[in-house]
Amino acid sequence: MIQPERVVSTVCPFCGVGCNLELHVRDGFIYKATSSFNSVVNHGNLCVKGRFGHDFIYHPQRVTVPLIRKKPQRPGDRTQAFDLSEWREISWDEALDYVADRLVDIYQREGPHAMAVYCCAKATNEDNYLLQKMYRALFRTNNVDHCTRLCHAASVVALQMAIGSAAMSNTAAEVIENDVFILTGSNPTENHPIIALQMKAAVRKHGAKLIVVDPRRIEMVDYATLYLPIKPGTDVPVFSAMAHVILKEGLYNRQFVEERTENFEAFATSMEKFTPEYAESISGVDRNLIIQAARLYATAKNAAIYWALGIPESSHGVANALSLINLALLTGHIGRRGTGLNPLRGQNNVQGASDAGAMPWHYPGYQRVDIEENARRWEQAWNIEPGGLSRQLGLTTTEILSSVGPGGVRALYIMGENPMMSEPNLNHTRQKMQELEFLVAQDLFINESGAFADVFLPAASWAEKEGTFTNTDRRVQRVRQVIPPRGQSRPDWEIICDLAKRIEKRLGRPTTAYWDYRHPSEILEEMGRYVPEYAGVTYERLEREGGLQTPVWDKQHPGTPFLFAETFPRGRGKFHPLDYTPNAEMPDDDYPFVLSTGRVLEHWHGGTLTRHSWLDDLFPEPLVDIHPDDAARLGIQNGDAVRVTSRRASIVLRARVTPKTNPGVVFIPFHFHEAAANLLTHDIIDPQAKIPEYKAAVVRVSKARPE
Ligand code: SF4
């Protein structure tokens, strides 16, 4: 058996669970991943991605030298170049000077509104803090966002409105302390596999009762006491009908409502119309199931709610999330161990990137950019003249691309994201990418978005740099360098500092922000000086204590496993009256199916990493899930090529006939460029959170015939 020369502890680079990894190295090569049974996050368990998905580091298509396009790109006729023959290798100095020249030229000619950046939920807290700092401090714009906009933005907005804090209120492993828990819009077996293990243990070993509310018959239904097979987008009627029952039967927590909430009367009045009969007529869920679920949840000693993207990815995602929050406030199932509101975050560091200010309306620490006191604080932090930072809310990811064109965004910098796979209505996205005047991609591979770039900056992988990730339950953990960066690739934070200094020199401003960090620990220290929740997080403590759950108010504070024991950040929790709003698109004779998009266990998001791993051999092609009844009616058999058509596009892929999806609903994972699911989705967004409705585009399905 091969014996490792070194075993280095770090964190999994994939999902938000944040499992601890031990990477085994021999002859400078990472050949194996295991995990320690002592890990408080995953107790030695890993899913297939964590165990086997790290080989992308060595993939032959990985780019490890800076590249520039041979043919100059112009707005309107920008093209994709995947083939290296269309690029020229250049030195780092040439690449960074060129990027600085072009960005400064566009900024000085067009102004701050022409500049925009996509930060990255896969990158470290330190990388994200620096990239938003570069754009805010140097280009004076808040056009800073990342893929949180495309996943939990509506949960964040709703939680901020109702309680003033957007993170998971509990530690994930606390699920075993639930007597009852609701799982909705979430398929943890595929998307948060280690949390799914903990949920199964809660049911099988600890006797918890599980209520699943989902348009797909996901694996967790096998563990459920109740399954409510909801039609996509009818969350508000179902959860509000549960509130209706709880109110009508006097099952709510009067003391909690009186002492810790506000706006109860208006909320209670608005719930009157949501009778179980009304909810059944809209959602298709049997009224008796709704009544049983309401009683089970309300009468539990400890109950919690877990949700993922089925709730926020909707044109009324904020209302969906508010309908869950209302239930927790009504029953007082929040503020104690084993109770709470838990949006399960998707990517490894989407929580941390949001904490670090990679968002258009907030500085680090969720400090609004349009509040004078906050802007002053960050001007001081970054040595900027008073009034220098923009007080205007920036554009969100979808708005950034929509605004590309004369008078709008002209230059885009993408660190590690892939909007050409992740944005809705990809034909529109493609058109906007083509219209950019200048595009920089900083990544490991030339993905569908990077292929449009003028310059490609090769980044080090997570195993080749130091930093921290913050997982879904607010746990800040150390990411450790295991091997040197491959080729000439460099850690993102180093690239940003080097580029920022060049930009600053060209701008010739009298005051200068600081860019001379010797180690990422100094970056986190700077963030902690101005973000109270991170004040007590230091590398020294992380080395000693393993991980710290924010808020960590000072160097002695132990961290916070669950939130809101005494109060909510906004004071009282606020009930919100709700109305039912249908999805932006509803099935009709031409488009009779609702398409839901999502992930599969073996892949991850736009596929940039997992499709360059042997994980791709395990799930090598896109499939559309269709219910056996629908398949029989359409004459479709398992494995047949089918055409799926929406109002925007048509794709061909093979069918997987499965009772996992309910009649009238089809499911397509969004990892595959060969049949990109987001060609079909529409770009109508929630008006408050600006999140697209990925879970409910209408489509028709037919057997594919040769064109
Ligand atoms: Fe990695 Fe998530 Fe799998 Fe854990 S559950 S090994 S964090 S992908």
Image: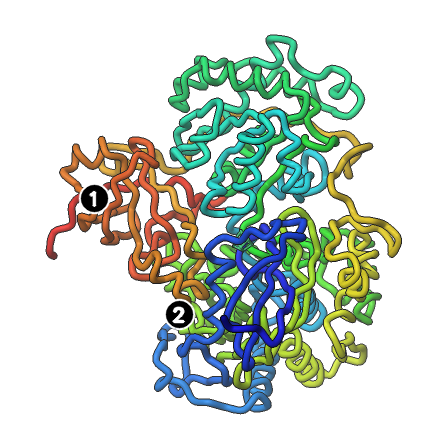
Looking at the rendering, in which quadrant would you find the C terminus?
bottom left
Which residue is most to the left?
706
Whether residue 369 sits left or right of residue 212 in the image: it is right
Residue tagged by mark 1?
Answer: 638
Name the spot of residue 371 as percent of width and height, x first: 77, 51
Which residue is most to the front?
1
Looking at the rendered structure, the secondary structure element under dot 1 is loop
Whether residue 702 sits left or right of residue 262 in the image: it is left
Name the spot of residue 211 as percent of width and height, x first: 51, 26
Please tell me which residue lies in front, 669 or 429.
Answer: 669
Above or below, comparing residue 645 to residue 274 in the picture = below
Query: Mark number for residue 184?
Result: none
**Disc nearer the start of the sequence (2/1):** 2
Residue tagged by mark 2?
Answer: 434
Please tell me which residue lies in front, 385 or 637.
Answer: 637
Please tell me which residue lies in front, 281 or 254.
Answer: 254
Q: Who's the residue at 59% across and 61% down the image?
A: 21
